[in-house]
Structure formats: C-alpha cells, structure tokens
Image: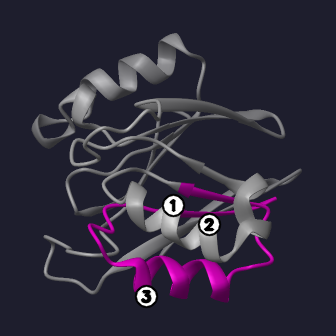
Amino acid sequence: MRIIVISDTHGSKKAVDSVFLRNSDADLFIHLGDGERDIDAFLLENPSFTPKVVHVAGNCDFGSLSNTFEIIPVENHKILATHGHIYNVKYGLQMLKEAAARLNCDIILYGHTHVRDNTYEDGVYILNPGSAGNPHDFKAPSFATITVTANGVLTNIADI
C-alpha cells in the first residue's frame, strides 16, 4: 500500500493539486490539517479521489467538523494521524507518543510544526511531512510517502 501524506498547506491548493495529481496511483492520501479548504476545493474538482482521502482538522481549520485525529488500520499496522496541536507537539512529542501507545498505533503522523521529521523509535515510525505551504525549517515545501508491504514499512519525505 502506498500512502501520500501532506500537511499545513495554508491556502496552497496548488501544492495539493501538484502532490495528489502526480501521485494519483497512491492507495491513500492523508492531509494532517491546516488546509481543509484546500482539500475541499481539490475534491470538488477531482471527486474520484474522495474515497481515498482522509483529513484531520488543524488549529487553523476554523469551523471544521472534521476529527482532530484519526486511527487508520493499514495491513498489520495502525496509523495515528493528527495535526498535533492537541498534543502540544511544538513542545515535544511525549504526549503524542503516549497517545499512540494507548491506541496501539505503530505509525504516528503529525503536522503543526512545519518542520520535517522522519524517525523510527522503539518500534514506532514517527513522521511529519513538513509544510506544503509554509515550511519553517528553511527547506522546500514537502510531503511524505509511506509504503507498507509484507516486508515492512518505508517512509520518505520529498520536496514538492
């Protein structure tokens, strides 16, 4: 299974269009918040993607009715997808890691910091795709890919 992860587009529908359309063969697309209007606009123009898109609400998705986190089962893994603000990720990942452990998730996806993170720690994959709209790490706008096979999990972050 191939998964595309994007976050913090903040009005850059062009970034959503570019990433999703270039990777249209992916099995799942996850938007980690702060860009719900961008996702909504993309899905209005590309309704065939709708069954393959999951998104969570970020702190700037005002008036959103979306959940602040989702648990997504994939093969023999469970993904915790969240924007991260409810777990105070700007001050560390401890709350987020504890939540993932309680929920038996071994893949953590978060945004909010606008800074890329791709680590593997204590049997858990931790991935922040960075920001597709306004990165804070002096790098190019980015997104992430996750490939899950019978042989394991591969995570990667790529420039847009």
Q: Disc 3 designates what residue?
A: 160
- Callout 3, which amino acid? Ile
Q: Is residue 3 magenta?
A: yes
Residue at point 84% right, 40% down? 75
Q: Disc 1 designates what residue?
A: 40
Q: Which residues are magenta?
A: 1-30
Residue at point 37% right, 38% down? 64
Nearest to the observer: residue 81 or residue 13? 13
- Give the structural element (helix, strand or loop) at label 2: helix
C-beta proximity under 8 Å, tags 3 and 2 = no
Q: Is residue 90 magenta?
A: no
Q: Position of residue 12 (x, y in %)?
A: 33, 78
- Callout 1, which amino acid? Asp
- Callout 2, which amino acid? Leu
Q: Residues within 10 Å of mark 1 (few under 14, many from 20)?
A: some
- Give the structural element (helix, strand or loop) at label 3: loop
Q: Disc 2 designates what residue?
A: 43
Q: Position of residue 9 (x, y in %)?
A: 33, 69
Q: In the rendered view, would you say 83 is above or below 157?
A: above
